[in-house]
Amino acid sequence: MLDHHHKGENMNCKCGKELTDVKVEIELAFNVERLNENGTWEPIPNSIAAPREIMCMDCFSTFVDVIDDTFNKES
Amino acid sequence: MFRHNNQLILKTTRDCNLRCEYCYIKNKDHFKGEMIEYNLYKTTIDRMVDERLSNKQPISIIFHGGEPTLTPKPQFIKMVTYAENQFRKHGIHYSFGMQSNLTLIDEEWCQILSKYNISLGCSFDGVGDSMDKRTTIKQQSFYDKFDMLKKYNVSFGFLMVIHEGNINNVMESYQFLRNNYEIENIKVNYVEDINGLGGEVNGSEFFTKAWKPFLDDYINEDTPYQLPEGNCQHLLSKFVSDYVMNSEISEKSNCGSKICGGGMSIVEMEANGDFQLCGRYSGNSPEAYIMNVNDKDLFSLKQLRKYLYFINEKHKVILDVGCDTCLADGICDHGCMAFYYSKFGKWGIRTDLTCDIHKDFYDYCVQHISELLRAVHKEIQRNGEAKYMLANRAINIKSNNTPYIKTLSKKYGLMLELDPMNDRSLLIKDINKV
């Protein structure tokens, strides 16, 4: 199904639920550099990306839980 | 899969009616009769539209293969029409292209290509017996196709793949196309013998016979000329960024940058919906596989992870080869990991080919930098000023005491300036008109 991100049109979360009350828009800034032989961080222009998703509150909550489980475990 | 790319290589089939010796698709007999299903294609376009609603950059779809003209014409028309309608409905700028061996092109295909503004990339190895490594079809048959394309106003260009069978008639072939079909631009690529059948030309010979003649003509003061070969145009821009300017690496190039955009800025889809980093991977290589068009991918994270994996492998290869400290590092295409993997089953680059080609190119440009900048000015100047697009973002012009700066000034009456309006543009100005 197509997600329509235009104002006024019905919007759906990736889970299928229609977004009627609150929507969460998340954009990730992705950029990779490599350490070259000269000891300099060299940019990789093809790696620059800013993927964006819109999700419902429930999916956002799940997303946060996944991040939390992955990165915030007590060692 | 479609958030970050500007080009989709869509293989409607891996089947082909030819068996060119140097083709990177192996085991073509295995794919006999393969054809993309319309519903899968529709899913692809729908996904593209969905993922590009927040990215209004133009997208190009290149119909590829195998041989894409094996696609039944009614299906092809249906496919192109659907994509057009969806893109226009959602305000997505688009263009269509096709790469073909021309053998199946007829008047109907010409009408389709013309109607839908599909630019055709023609594989043509040159005059004489150059095409013998590809087909037994007579040369005249291809010339008849060119005439047909012109008759129907199809936009077309040529790609020449150089091997030992055509290395000696590159310029003759280009001049034939220019004089008979008004072709102004061409791309001349070197072949890598991934099938082990021989026919490769070594790097130095390739530069000397395939690219150098175009450069020589370009700097010849008596020739009212342009630089028609696409690789030379690109490399020259990279050279000027590297040699003349202090610059920041900013070029996003699908194919030809230090770490190519395969899997990010350019993606390839097989007829079964599988995405690969690049169409040059032969066979179903797990290393090149990204996902299927039916797979979900939040934030395109799986795609990003795959591309990051590729970056890391290329990084290791670059360190192993020593590219970072090479004189030609700023212009080199650093080899094709896809071709290397297809031939050897592991990551690497063909230093025996890549290094000589680009080092020779770099040396040539160093020796002829003044003439090259004069030729650029001659080609593109308007009212005495040429705005030359650089591959990378310019910080400033390197030391003004270099010999070529003096030569430009004294011999050609030209000076260099950064364009204050665009940090990717170098101004080459006629001193007398400043």
Image (cartoon, rainbow, N blue to C red):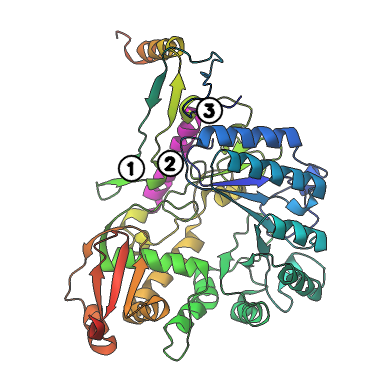
Residue at point 45%, 53% (across, down): B253
Residue for badge 3: A4
Q: Which amino acid, mark 2?
A: Ile
Mark 3 and mark 2 residues within 8 Å of each other at the beta carbon:
no
Left or right, B401 with respect to B407, comes to left
Magenta segment: B301-322
Q: Is residue B290 visible?
A: no
Looking at the rendered structure, the secondary structure element under dot 2 is helix
User: Residue B360: which quarter of the image?
Assistant: bottom left
Say yes or no: labels 3 and 1 on the same chain. yes
Residue at 47%, 69% in the rendered image = B232
Q: Are marks 1 and 2 in contact (CB under 8 Å)?
A: yes
**Residue under pointer 1:** A34
Tell me the quadrant of the picture where the N terminus of chain B can be found.
top right
Q: In the picture shown, does residue B133 fall above or below B407?
A: above
- Residue at the spot of label 2: B311
Question: Who's the residue at 47% across and 45% down the image?
Answer: B57
Q: Chain of mark 2?
A: B
Question: Closest to the observer: B409 or B236?
Answer: B409
